[in-house]
Image: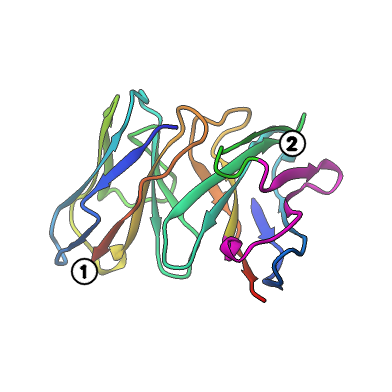
């Protein structure tokens, strides 16, 4: 299985800050990396797929980049609504493993 | 409008069997892979497996292979997750989810069910 490692596992930031979450795959996954946001008690929400393709309706302050083994999710100007746990997931080969999550507190 | 509506919460005893459902609507059920994701209380997301309704091609995570069965009923656009003998460690929220695009798994899960909470306790 491909292992996905996210860091940091948690972070605290303020409204207006720029934050970056990193995800590293244990092997080359090309561009097949997805990012999700999960608020407490809710189902995950897809933010970005294929490393940098926006899912419809996602605010433009979210962006993704990377290829191969190293990927980042950047939130350019934090809003209170962004408080959530963020997960990366590789969809290069099954099982489509998730990272352990990054809890963002604002 | 695409919708995935899951069956309700279940409370079961160890050793009992269970099947939970994910009824879909608003799209061509046969052509989109559907997956199941587990989330234990306070923990992260775990990919369990996926199924392609057109031909019931199924891929499981090794962690769940032999522990659960994923199936579909195309006639009612519904996917299922089944256990033959539940354990206390199966206590979790289970989500079904549909991929972004048809006929491929190499994209994320765009649409999610609301989750089915399964509690296994003696």
Verify whether residue B17 appears in magenta.
Answer: no
Find residue B51 and report its image quarter.
top right
- Cα separation, mark 2 vs mark 1, equals 41 Å
Residue A65 point in image, percent of width and height: 26, 34
Residue A35 seen in this snapshot = yes
Residue furthest to the bottom in view is B122
Residue under the image location 42 percent in, 51 percent down: A57
Q: Residues within 10 Å of mark 1 (few under 14, many from 20)?
A: some
User: Does label 1 lie on the same chain as label 2?
Assistant: no
**Labelled pair 2, 1 in contact (Cβ < 8 Å):** no
Q: Which residues are magenta?
A: B66-93
Mark linked to residue A106: 1
Q: In this rendered view, identify the residue nearer to me: B52 or B27.
A: B52
Pick the front one: B115 or A49: B115
Which residue is labeled 2 in the image? Answer: B53
Residue B102 bears which disc, if any? none
Above or below, A71 relative to A104: above
| The C terminus of chain B lies in quadrant | bottom right
x, y percentage for residue A30? 35, 23
């Amino acid at each position: 299985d491909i292992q996905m490692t996210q860091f940091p596992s948690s972070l605290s930031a303020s409204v207006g800050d720029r934050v970056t979450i990193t995800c590293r795959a244990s092997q080359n996954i090309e561009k097949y990396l997805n990012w999700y946001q999960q608020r407490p008690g809710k189902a995950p929400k897809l933010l970005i797929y294929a490393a940098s393709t926006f899912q419809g309706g996602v605010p433009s302050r979210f962006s993704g980049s990377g290829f191969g083994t190293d990927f980042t999710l950047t939130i350019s100007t934090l809003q209170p609504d962004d408080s959530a746990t963020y997960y990366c997931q590789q969809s290069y080969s099954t099982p489509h493993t998730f990272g352990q999550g990054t809890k963002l507190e604002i | 409008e695409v919708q995935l509506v899951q069956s309700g919460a279940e409370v079961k005893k160890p050793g009992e069997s269970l099947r939970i459902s994910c009824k879909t609507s608003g799209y061509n059920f046969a052509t989109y892979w559907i997956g199941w994701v587990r989330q234990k209380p306070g923990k992260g997301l775990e990919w369990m497996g996926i199924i392609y309704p057109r031909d019931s091609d199924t891929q499981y995570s090794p962690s769940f292979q032999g522990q659960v069965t994923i199936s579909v009923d195309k006639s009612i656009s519904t996917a299922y997750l089944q256990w033959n003998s539940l354990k206390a460690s199966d206590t979790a929220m289970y989500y079904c989810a549909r991929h972004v695009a048809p006929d491929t798994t190499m994209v994320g899960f765009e649409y999610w069910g609301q989750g089915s909470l399964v509690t296994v306790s003696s």
